[in-house]
Amino acid sequence: MSQNKVEPTELQKKTLMLLRENPKRGIGSAMREAGYKPVTSLKPKQNFTDLKGVAVAIEEWREALRGSGLDESWLIKKYKEWGEATKIKSSFTEPDKVVPDYETQLKVKDDIRGDFGLPVGRESGVVQQTQVTIFTRLSRGADEFVEGEEVKGE
């Protein structure tokens, strides 16, 4: 009895290529751009990620990476390097100094969390807060004063 080998379709290959180019993109959006009908892209798990052809294409991609030397040990070394990333902080008035590159370190955090099966991004329960400070310029008239100043009459 011969086994049928499942092959990914052209649409599946194109969708995966689009997702590799921009990993933050939604699967449904990549499916539509690849040529799937909009109604099909509404259920990407059922109509894409759960399909055997997609699993085959992902495994083929992993094997190609391993064949090029980009395997798990290489990735672990890079994660460690990125997690300890530093940069040079320059100043006109002080000597240059090496400081942690938090931006790079935070970018790799979600990848590492995902590899450990932990929630990433907005799923992690971390709420990003932004503080905005507004400075206003006060103008003083003849009857106005600033705390600590004497008020002199005219």
Image (spheres, grey):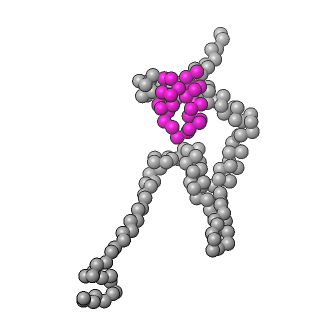
Image coordinates of residue 43 in percent, x first then y, are: 43, 28
Q: How many marks?
A: 0
Q: Quadrant of the C terminus?
A: bottom left
Q: Residue at x 56, y 32 (%)?
A: 18
Q: Which residues are magenta?
A: 10-36
Image coordinates of residue 10 in percent, x first then y, are: 58, 21
Image coordinates of residue 21 in percent, x first then y, are: 59, 36
Left or right: residue 128 compared with residue 90: left
Q: Is 29 colored magenta in this rendering?
A: yes
Q: Residue at x 51, y 47 (%)?
A: 120
Q: Is 64 colored magenta in this rendering?
A: no
Residue in front for this viewpoint, 108 or 104: 104
Return the residue found at the far front. Answer: 154
Image coordinates of residue 14 in percent, x first then y, are: 57, 26
Q: Quadrant of residue 87?
A: bottom right
Above or below, 140 relative to 101: below
Which SS does the magenta portion mostly show? helix
Q: Residue at x 31, y 78 (%)?
A: 140
Above or below, 103 relative to 10: below
